[in-house]
């Protein structure tokens, strides 16, 4: 059986994840990457997306990240994220409201619109919504 690696997902406010994992998949700016025990060390920037990992027992987990950096070492993956939320902590209604606000801003086409910021907000909301859509749609 393969060895586990230690996964740490940290924001400026808190530790979001700190546990052993069998495999970690993350959204690098050049594409998704995976890390297993014994991986060659590297450092990369992250884009908005989801980190997918299997814990020591093989259970799958998902964590939303909105950018940051990841460092992979042979025995550890450390993700320093601007913000991060476990899938089960994402509030569907809040994510939906953020999505609707971003859509409205982009549709308004006001002269003072910060297009890049509004588009970034839309992307973050869309990823968060997609993560909880299946588990929340049954209850909405």
Image (cartoon, helix red, strand yellow):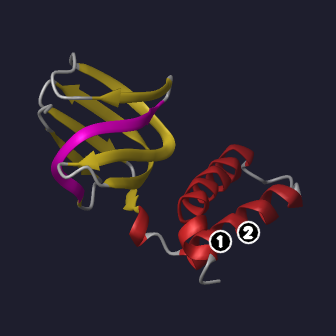
Reply above or below: 42 against 127: above
Is residue 117 found left or right of 81 in the rendered image?
right
Segment tinted magenta in the rendering: 16-28
Q: Position of residue 56 (x, y in %)?
A: 17, 49
Give yes or no for residue 81 being in the magenta stretch.
no
Callout 1: 10 Å neighbours few (<14), some, many (20+)?
some
* Residue 19 within the segment the image draws in magenta: yes
Q: Nearer the viewer, residue 9 or 51?
A: 51
Residue at 16 percent of width and 52 percent of height: 19
37 up-or-down from 5: above or below = above
Is the C-beta separation of discs 1 and 2 under 8 Å? yes
User: Which residue is pictured at 39% across the width and 49% down the height?
Assistant: 82
The residue sitting at the bottom extreme is: 139
Q: Secondary structure at mark 1?
A: helix
Across and down, in percent, residue 126 comes to 64, 56
Q: Residue 69: x and y, percent?
A: 34, 35
Residue beneath disc 1: 96
The residue beneath circle 2 is: 100
Residue 93 lies in quadrant: bottom right
């Amino acid at each position: 059986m393969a060895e586990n690696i230690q996964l740490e997902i940290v924001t400026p406010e808190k530790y979001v994840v700190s546990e052993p994992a069998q495999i970690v998949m993350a959204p690098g700016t050049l594409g998704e990457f995976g890390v297993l025990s014994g991986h060659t060390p590297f450092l990369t920037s992250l884009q908005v997306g989801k980190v997918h990992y299997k814990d020591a027992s093989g259970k799958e987990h998902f964590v939303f990240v909105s950018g940051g950096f990841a460092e992979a070492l042979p025995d550890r993956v450390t993700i320093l994220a601007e913000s991060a939320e476990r899938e089960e902590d994402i509030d569907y209604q809040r994510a939906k409201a953020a999505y609707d606000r971003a859509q409205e801003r982009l549709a308004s086409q006001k002269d003072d619109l910060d297009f890049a910021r509004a588009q970034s907000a839309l992307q973050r909301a869309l990823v968060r919504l997609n993560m909880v859509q299946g588990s929340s749609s049954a209850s909405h």
